[in-house]
Amino acid sequence: MTGFMAEHTGQDQHFRHQHLFGIEQLSVSDILLVLNTARSFRDISARAIKKVPTLRGKTVVNLFFEPSTRTRLSFEIAAKRMSADTFNISAAGSSAVKGETLIDTAKNIQAMKPDVVILRHSSSGAPYLLARNIEAAVINAGDGAHEHPSQGLLDMMTVLDHKGRLDGLKVAIIGDIAHSRVARSDILGFVKMGSEVFLAGPQTFIPPEVSRLGATVCGSVAEAVRDADVVMTLRIQLERQNDPLIPTLREYAKFYGINKAVLELAREDAIVMHPGPVNRGVELSPDVADGSRSVILDQVTNGVAVRMALLYLILGGSKGNEGQGDK
Amino acid sequence: MGGTLRLLNGRILDPTQQRDEIADLFIRDGVVVDALSDEGGDVECLDVAGCWVVPGLIDVHVHLREPGEEYKETIASGCLAAAAGGFTAVACMPNTKPVNDNGSITRYIVEQALTCAARVYPVGAISQGSGGDKLAEYGEMKDAGAVALTDDGRPVVDSQLMRRAMEYASSHGLPIMSHSEEIALSRHGSMHEGAVSTRLGLKGIPAAAESIMVYRDVALAELTGARLHIAHVSTEQSLAVIRAAKTRGVKVTAETAPHYFTLTDEAVEGYNTHAKMNPPLRTEKDRQAIRDALADGTLDAIATDHAPHSVLEKDVEFNLAANGIVGLETSLPLSLALVRDGVISPLRLVELMSSAPAAILGVAGGTLRPGAAADVTVIDPQRIFTFNAAESFSKGKNSPFDGWRLQGRAVLTLLAGRVTFSDR
């Protein structure tokens, strides 16, 4: 633990939030508490027997209204490693297609007394609506283009692992900021922790007045990447809802893709990140995606640890339980 | 109502006579009469000292939902809400189910309204079914009682159709009300495009989506000589277009709504669907520009765009929620704040909410001249109350002002001398 972290985290600090909607609601010490807790849980995943009884008897519902492989799996593995019972509801198999409203779904799930509902939804703000209509805790696993806080936290954890700090860094985020909930959570998180965030992409990908979130918009990828400690790339799409954003993936790759030559501009020890799944050869050239600076798989590993920490902190697990789990 | 009513000691405000004085108002057989020639007989006296006595308020832009969506509002419930808000007349938009695009539906609305608490002036559709394709029968609708034409809520995309609508409407002496929105720019948007939409991750509607269409319709009004009314102006850019058009002598009038000079896009915070409407709440700069334009005459009227919805449409994800808020019972108190803030005079307020709306619709009202129907609103500008949407007369409870402490309201509303609302 660095001095910076020590001064922000007390030994018996409690997570003050019933729900997790976004990084926006978290303080610096909240973030450090999650990351410290996640680090202590990461060891569990490295053991032969990857299970502790910490959340035994707790019920975790994964309510996913959008397709998701890795986030849903990551939350499920996290819950199971803590011995919680997990249930998955995905849109295709749910009442959503039958016209049931989110509130109806919430009330029906509540009637079965879950402890936490993890929500993925295409509508920004959906976790707030769910939380107003349910007693269980709500964790936002990505809502529209708003936030994806567990991704933001696992990104910070990964940077902390590699850089030893979260303040004073230059973080470049390249790609479709406008439609990315990951970008919003990362911008808010890294700015909060004292780093500088630089954004680049064609203007069709830059949302209006994004500098109000504390980030700096750059005129070119080179400007954003120059001397960066962290280069974060985002998955991109040609168009959304018939809204043309870029002409071709080929042109995007040429002008905005991260390849070895662009990466030369970054600091020698810069790391390359991506929330996945990667469009190889588009936002990241294959040699960079699989190269020595890529920490993409570390992000995935840390994802499980961060989600274990979130479940633990939100479900109010006590140190006593954790101790039993360690024995 | 037979007999004579005397409203004593009120502050008479009548922009049509430039009257602003403490005086009595006499009403006989539902008509305003000259005080001097009408003494004697059986007179009912009401002391309204400290109150304003104004021509009944007129709202040029409401949605009454009948026929078709009576679970949201009926003509009767909407008129009760109007009376409680100090309104004696409303113009109702044609986006009912079915659309008011022919004489028989117009006539149905007029007949339903006969026994209601306010005059109802139907606004017919520009195009059949508001489909944006073929002209509706303006002559038939006018004969049945329509006073204007609009495809409100379904902006007219085709510029040639809008041109023909203006020309044909002119032949029938009807104004066109433009819901100015370039839908290619606003599609899928659910709030103003700016810093707040970026933070909340909601797709935005840029200000240009409105002003582009305001410009098109002003240009077409200039081309055709038609009378054009721009509905629910929300942006500074639109005001600049309207101001320039008025300077050139284009026959254009314009309205805004109380939410546009009271709230900004910050009200959406927390994904509050009661702050979702179309056009959306804009920035503080736009809000200030709207206030200035109410004062300088660029804007002619305050309308509510009263748009009742049920929880079915509002208690859902923000981007899926219906647009619109109720407004009839909060419009006057929110507008009175402009007077207290020194933005407009009391006389100008009455012009914006009564005299000008009557002129825009080409209907009687908006005056206290002797001989006019006694559509009269008595306003207590000091009365402080908390607006409780759950207890409102409208069936719609979708108000961003629920729970607000407001100052000033109608305490007596008279329709042709008959009391339609009283809270004295």
Image: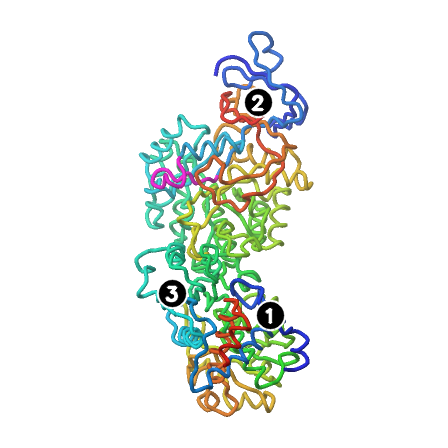
Which stretch did the figure color magenta?
B61-74
Q: Residue at x 32, y 42 (%)?
A: B98
Q: Secondary structure at mark 1?
A: helix
Left or right placement of residue B417 versus residue B156 in this view: right
Q: Is residue A256 visible?
A: no
The residues tagged by marks 2 and 1 sit, at their Cα atoms, a distance apart of 68 Å
B115 lies above or below B309: above
Identify the residue under disc 2. B369
Residue A106's disc is none
Q: Find disc 3 in the rendering and name its residue.
A: A65
Q: Residues within 10 Å of mark 2 (few under 14, many from 20)?
A: some
**Discs 2 and 3 carry the same chain letter:** no
- Residue type at the position of mark 2: Arg
Foreground mark, 1 or 3, reads: 1
| Closer mark to the observer between disc 2 and disc 1 | 1
Q: Write down the chain letter for disc 3.
A: A
Counting other residues with Cα less than 10 Å from the Cα at mark 3, is it few (<14), some (14-19), or many (20 or more)? many
Q: Secondary structure at mark 2?
A: loop
Classify mark 1: residues with Cα within 10 Å, few (<14), some (14-19) or many (20+): some
SS at mark 3?
A: loop
Where does the image place residue A222, in percent across and percent down from the top left? 57, 83
Residue B251 % position (x, y): 52, 42
Percent from the top left, x then y, of residue A1? 63, 82
Dividing the picture into quadrants, the one containing residue B113 is top left
Mark 1 highlights which residue? A30
Q: Is residue B399 above or below residue B266?
A: above
In which image quadrant can residue B54 be found? top right
Chain under numbered label 1: A
Question: In the rendered structure, does residue B85 fall within the stretch colored magenta?
Answer: no
- Residue B71 is covered by the magenta coloring: yes
